[in-house]
Image: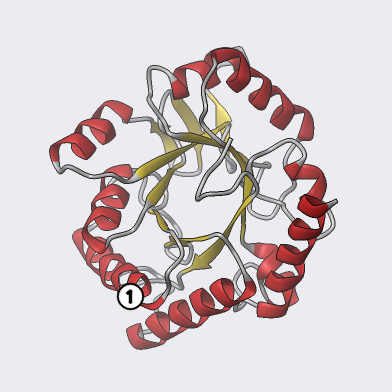
Amino acid sequence: MTIFGTNTAIIGMVHLSALPGSPGYDGNFDAIRTRALTDAHALESGGVDAIMVENFGDSPFYRDDVPKHVVASMTRIVTELRQAVSCPLGVNVLRNDAESALSIATASGADFIRVNVHTGARLTDQGVVEGNAHETLRLREEIGSGVTILADIDVKHSAPLAERPLDELVAETLGRGRADGVVVSGVGTGHEVDTDLLESVVAVRDKTGSSAPVLVGSGTTTENVADLLDVADGAIVGTALKSGGKTTNEVDESRVAKLVSRVHDRNES
């Protein structure tokens, strides 16, 4: 399966520092913009296939409806990034504001969004987070947006409210939920994905006859990326591309280039 013109897509993360209104905001919005632009340039120069922007510094997160000032801040930054880089660009509005993510992406000319809970419901540190696929898809239709929706299966930092068969979860996310792709992550940011779970999601996807890509959502490193891409169609990579391997640090272009080189070596072998 292909995404962004390749079957081994690497999506690098721009983790925004705390935005205005968040407890961690330091009062310097220009520094946030500059850091985002610097990280995006490093990711593109290092060779990623796409970039995703996320309000990572805004904890504790709103459950599913961020304030208007967050939408405004992210729209400004994503618009500047769209002008600065040529690769596909995505948006994730934490914790689960798919409508804002879709609106930001559409207005700024971005290409895709990530939705942590698209269908069903999960127990998180924000309480019970419910999927709103019905609203997200109708909004996309209403505003004439061509933005791609990547939806998580068993999203990190959460637990199921009730156990359900995996084949039902995947089939409903892709079928009734009409997601364009699915994401499989570990238990938390930077944690490796359960490869058995990843293989099972891919198997269910194949069984449904869907052409939707399956992406790894956390824990991808230079050391394991080749093995993960033997199963998945791509990976969203954040922590491993940061200086010192720390999520909140700046992107290290040499780390990006090393991981991308490993992917190229795998594809040529």
Residue at 69 percent of width and 55 percent of height: 190
Instruction: State the image coordinates of residue 121 (x, y, percent, origin top left).
Output: 44, 26
What colour-coding does the image apply?
A: secondary structure
Near-viewer residue (12 or 166) = 12
Question: Would you say 221 lies left or right of 149 here?
Answer: right
Q: Quadrant of residue 49?
A: bottom right
Question: Would you say 193 lies left or right of 163 here?
Answer: right
Near-viewer residue (20 or 154) = 154
In this rendering, the answer to whether 79 lies above or below 139 is below
Residue 156 makes an appearance in the image: yes
Near-viewer residue (64 or 82) = 82
Instruction: State the image coordinates of residue 66 (x, y, percent, origin top left).
Output: 28, 53
Residue bearing mark 1: 83
- Please state, as top left, top right, bottom left or bottom right, where the N terminus lies in the image: top right
Q: Quadrant of residue 237?
A: bottom right
Residue 246 makes an appearance in the image: no
Question: Would you say 159 lies left or right of 26 here?
Answer: right
In this rendering, the answer to whether 192 lies above or below 155 is below
In this rendering, the answer to whether 199 lies above or below 172 is below
Instruction: State the image coordinates of residue 207 (x, y, percent, origin top left).
Output: 61, 13
Q: How many marks?
A: 1
Near-viewer residue (160 or 12) = 12
Q: Residue furthest left?
A: 142
Instruction: State the image coordinates of residue 102 (x, y, percent, origin top left).
Output: 29, 48
Name the residue type under label 1: Gln
Q: Secondary structure at mark 1?
A: helix
Residue at 55 percent of width and 35 percent of height: 213
Residue at 32 percent of width and 46 percent of height: 147
User: Around disc 1, counting alpha carbons within 10 Å, would you say few (fewer than 14), some (14 to 19), or many (20 or more)?
Assistant: few
In this rendering, the answer to whether 174 lies above or below 52 is above
